[in-house]
Amino acid sequence: MTVTTGKKRDKIDRLAELAAVRDDERGVSLWQEAFRRLRRNPAAIVGAVILALFVLVAVVGPFFVPYGATDSIGIREGVVKSGQGIIPGPSGEHWLGYDHQGRDVFSRMVVGARQTLLVGVVSTLIGLAVGALIGGIAGASAGLGGRWGRWVDSTLMRFVDMLLALPSLLLAVSVAALLGASLTTVMIAVGVVSVPVFARLLRGSMISQSNSDYVLAATSLGVKRSRIALTHVVPNSLAPVIVQATLTLATAIIEAAALSFLGLGNPDSTIPEWGVMLADAQPYLGIRPALAIYPAVAIIVTALGFTLLGEAMREALDPKLRK
């Protein structure tokens, strides 16, 4: 009896030894592996560098600009005469030259980066918050709510489909025209455009997660459905939403610039913002086309940075591409 027991114990110990995971073989979480893949992705590195420079300029740059963003230096010095077609270009003191009102373009570009970042981040957060609320309720209702849950999900999704049926720019223009021209209006209008995207994305992810084994196990243990949705399903469904938020920042900056270009942004043109600067430069394209090129290139490069990083994050978090 003792010998038999000893053999069983030895077999169990041997099995445990073979099944043990060495330190160099331990698994990593989804986010850890995604970060490792991002570090090896050239597109992610380029996007991260662009965004780091953009954020650094937007946050710190306005404190170190050589001139005031609203100071009409060129007119005061008599070197800018836009009515006569005289708008000097770059020089040693003014790296990007003057605008039509004699203001230093470099200083306005740097200060305008903060406004552009503010509009992009706030509008994305608005869309993310509202869209996640709608999508979370719809996903939890569809996946865990039974018959009444499916009715709630169907009602919310029909509202989301109505928003998706409208072209994004047309929807943003309609909201901005309804609320009146202001910087807050631009944030709300661009945020409304991204609401259906976040809602459908989170809903689909939550429905997929609702069929997972851990949800079945929690349900069999008697855990309340609301707790399962909040503590298990939602956290495991956020990865694609976070990736989409990064991509939405790029489109938010472009759409905000489009609204400002159409005259639906901040009516105070003295406050620098890249979209407003682009609109103000239109009458002077024949004299100084660079006044439109500078903000246009800044918008394109910033949007490119967000897009590169977002696409890299999407690939890094895609389970089909993981080894």
Image: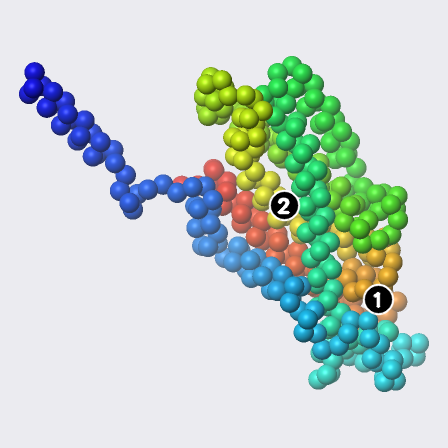
Q: Where is residue 43 in the image (x, y as percent from the top left)?
A: 53, 56
Lateral position of residue 317 relative to residue 307, left or right: left
Q: What element carries label 1?
A: loop
Q: How far apart in space, not on screen, are marks 2 and 1 (Cα)? A: 30 Å
User: Where on the picture, by quarter, is residue 305?
Assistant: bottom right
Residue 297, compared with residue 141, is above or below; it is below
Crowd around label 1: few <14 · some 14–19 · many ≥20 (10 Å) = some
Lateral position of residue 106 relative to residue 50, left or right: right
Residue identified by numbered label 2: 245
Lateral position of residue 225 relative to residue 120, left or right: left
Between disc 2 and disc 1, the foreground one is: 1
Q: What element carries label 2?
A: helix
Q: What residue type is labelled 1?
A: Thr
Crowd around label 2: few <14 · some 14–19 · many ≥20 (10 Å) = many
Q: Residue furthest right?
A: 83
Quadrant of the image for the C terminus? top left
Residue 220, compared with residue 300, is above or below; it is above
Identity of the residue drawn at 52% across and 45% down: 315
Identity of the residue drawn at 30% across and 43% down: 25
Identity of the residue drawn at 70% across and 38% down: 130
Quadrant of the image for the N terminus? top left
User: Where on the picture, by quarter, is residue 263?
Assistant: bottom right
Q: Do the residues labelled 2 and 1 touch (CB within 8 Å)?
A: no
Q: Position of residue 301 (x, y in %)?
A: 65, 61
N-terminal of the pair, mark 2 or mark 1, is: 2
Identity of the residue drawn at 60% across and 40% down: 241
Residue identified by numbered label 1: 270
Residue 262 visible within the image: no
Q: Position of residue 161 (x, y in %)?
A: 74, 30
